[in-house]
Image (spheres, rainbow, N blue to C red):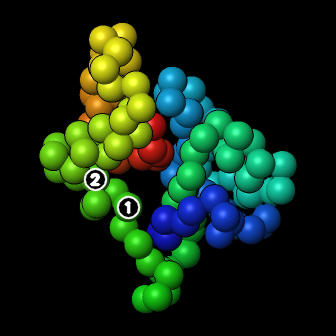
Amino acid sequence: MIRLKIGELKPGMILARSVYNQQDLLLLEKDSALTKKRIWMIKTWGIDQVSIKGEPLEDNCTDFGAELENKDTIEKELKAKFADVIEDPVMQEIMKAAGRQLHKRLSDPKKENEPI
């Protein structure tokens, strides 16, 4: 399995894991072949990486899930994403909910761990 950024995807590649949006709705099932339209759809949902079937090349392999495994790193990433609105109490609650969702996705191997 290879984790690739959206810009690296090509039509014909096969998904190694199902792709879900931020609301946990299924976008594409595991074993789906990518097309230009499906790549565009994934991108428009704000997903920037997916798992593709195949063997990683040493110079092309990045384990994004491992980068986000600990709580401190997740909080740091979320604070960076919410930096412009962090003072708003409503946005703070949304950030907390996003953190819980990300922790849930990282602990569930059946779901694709897409960034919030």
Q: Is residue 88 left or right of residue 114?
A: left
Q: Nearer the viewer, residue 95 or 19?
A: 95
Q: Residue furthest top?
A: 90
Q: Amino acid at mark 2?
A: Leu
Q: Residue at x 46, y 88 (%)?
A: 59
Total numbered badges shown on the rendered structure: 2
Q: Nearer the viewer, residue 58 or 26?
A: 58
Query: Of helix, strand and loop, which one carries label 1?
Result: helix
Q: Is residue 48 left or right of residue 91?
A: right
Q: Amino acid at mark 1?
A: Phe
Query: Of helix, strand and loop, which one carries label 2?
Result: loop
When asked about the image quadrant of residue 28, the answer is: top right
Q: Which percent across, then down, holds residue 78? A: 33, 38
Q: Residues within 10 Å of mark 2 (few under 14, many from 20)?
A: some
Label at residue 42: none
Q: Is residue 81 left or right of residue 6?
A: left
Label at residue 68: 2
Q: Is residue 78 visible?
A: no
Label at residue 64: 1
Pointers 2 and 1 in contact (C-beta within 8 Å)? yes
- Quadrant holding the C terminus: top left
Spatial separation of the CA atoms under disc 2 and disc 1: 7 Å
Q: Residue at x 55, y 75 (%)?
A: 54
Q: Residue furthest bottom?
A: 58
Q: Which percent across, then down, holds residue 40? A: 77, 48
